Amino acid sequence: MKLLPINCNSYSCKYTTTSQTATGQNNKISKPVFKSLWSPKTPDLSERFQYGLQALDEQSVLVVTSNEASSNMMLETYADNIDIPVMKKYTLHVKKGELKDCDELNSNFAIYKKNNKYYILSLSEHPLKNLRVDMSKEAYNKDNLLSGGKIKELNNGVIIHTGEMIWETSGEKHKFVFTPPKISETHSAEKYLEVSNVKNLKEFNKRTINALNTPEPKTNYTKGITFEDIGGLDDVIETLKKYVVRPINYPEVYKNIRLNKGILLWGPPRCGKTLLGKALANEANAKYREYNANEFKSSTVGTSENNIRQVFKQAAADAPSITFIDEFDSIAKTRDGSSNARFDDPMVNQLLGCMSDLEKCAAPAFIIAATNMKKLIDPALLASGRFGLHIEVHMPDLEGLKQIFNIHTKKQHIMNDVSVKELSQTMLENKFNGSDVAEMVTDAFFNGLERLELNKKMDNKTLVFSDLEKIALSKSDFLKAIQRIVKQKI
Ligand code: ATP
């Protein structure tokens, strides 16, 4: 019988999956909805706020945050304090500096609505020091400030009474205005569940918020990148096929074998590690998520470990999945070159614990850790059963540079005077990595436009369609590009 690659979605393990959460209740509910309110098209914070508040019905929360990962964790931590059944979550991203002169917005908070009143929940262990609601007539009351984990009603429950929310810094007011929300028909008409059916609200919210915190799949992010788009790393690709792609595509073959779920990709910068992670996900038809390990770090006690747990939990729930963690050394460091970091570094400890849980679970969830500094990583993490498979992603050799050149010029017209071998030799002598090759092609294109005087035509608005057909890159375009990159490298 011929075995065909399959995409398996149902693996059981100790983690709760999104689908279990969504269907685990005896209610008429569909999957929880997640929506991010950040879009470059809505740059103004007050506008986004208005939009967010309008979107709130009595089954949703609006999380205001500059760090989504940590606010998600905290929302789970404080889920017990929300006394509406949460079925939707909106995230309002606040960029640093967007709240002018308001350095104090280091805490995240969530807003929800009940009986037409708004409630603010601090998603931090610290009180929202500078957040207050302008109560116009009533005096500003310190007790009304929210502290972690507790919901207090501001101004007897009417939170956005005046339609203004004000942040204060050292007595000076910095405000951004949002008017009282109009209840949008579309949102209020959406009914997700019969509230009366929810017997245990705390339990219910724990489950739904957990599911809501599952970020949207970033499958588009991989933009259809496959192994064909990677040059000079045939050996690495073969290893990844052996340990990841085939085991995911043909689970029947590997069902009695323990898979290496932790993989370390190490090597010099800009040689294709991230590219490999994305291609791997597409080749294995697996869900892809990418993180920078620095995002996990938090100054709040316990949050960094919580973030790590969440990422592993997500990976298992997504299986088959590829979770790519860049700059892994930043959370997996050995201290002073000793192998004792795990004893005093809670993040290393957490990683060890999560890896051992992942090993035990049947889900094909692969964690790909990437680093430029393998030496810094705690040896305990590099042992077998953890990140036990180490793959070097090396600099390209002559053949590799030729391949990378061909990949990046696939859609360009190249003139006959270009010798790929000669160019690659020059690149090799100048220690070009994959990213340098990509940049050289882009630069050569700009040089070509200049040589053909198409820049002038664009400026004079005399460019015609047939001019585009003239664009072909010459040897001199490439050499000029190489020169610029080499000069910058010094
Ligand atoms: P870092 O260590 O700095 O995170 P990295 O090793 O993850 O870098 P990538 O982000 O994968 O490097 O590469 C950056 C860009 O360089 C890619 O998007 C691609 O355009 C190009 N590139 C790098 N290596 C290769 C390669 N081997 N084949 C084709 N293109 C490559």
Image (cartoon, helix red, strand yellow):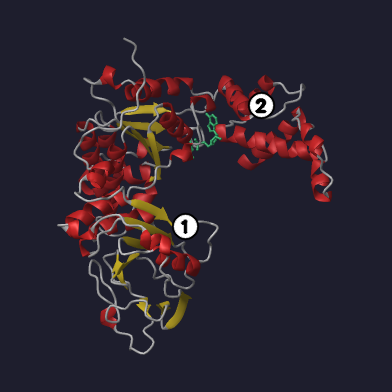
Q: Hey, which quadrant is residue 392 in on the image? A: top left
- Determine whether, in the image, residue 295 is placed left or right of residue 447: left
Other-residue count near label 2 (Cα within 10 Å), few / some / many at <14 / 14–19 / ≥20: some
Residue at left offset 30%, top offset 42%: 314
Q: Position of residue 279 (x, y in %)?
A: 46, 30
Are the residues tagged 1 and 2 within 8 Å (C-beta)? Answer: no
Give the residue pinned by disc 1: 38
Q: Secondary structure at mark 2?
A: helix
Image position of 236 with respect to 277: above or below: above
Which quadrant: the C terminus?
Answer: top right
Q: Secondary structure at mark 1?
A: loop
Give the residue pinned by disc 2: 426
- Viewer-nearest of discs 1 and 2: 1
Other-residue count near label 1 (Cα within 10 Å), few / some / many at <14 / 14–19 / ≥20: some
Q: Position of residue 332 (x, y in %)?
A: 32, 42
The mark that comes first in sequence, 1 or 2, is: 1
Residue lying furthest left in this view? 199
Q: State the CA–CA distance, disc 1 to disc 2.
A: 45 Å
Q: Could one spot residue 229 in this view of the protein?
A: yes
Residue at left offset 35%, top offset 52%: 33
- Determine whether, in the image, residue 85 is placed left or right of residue 434: left
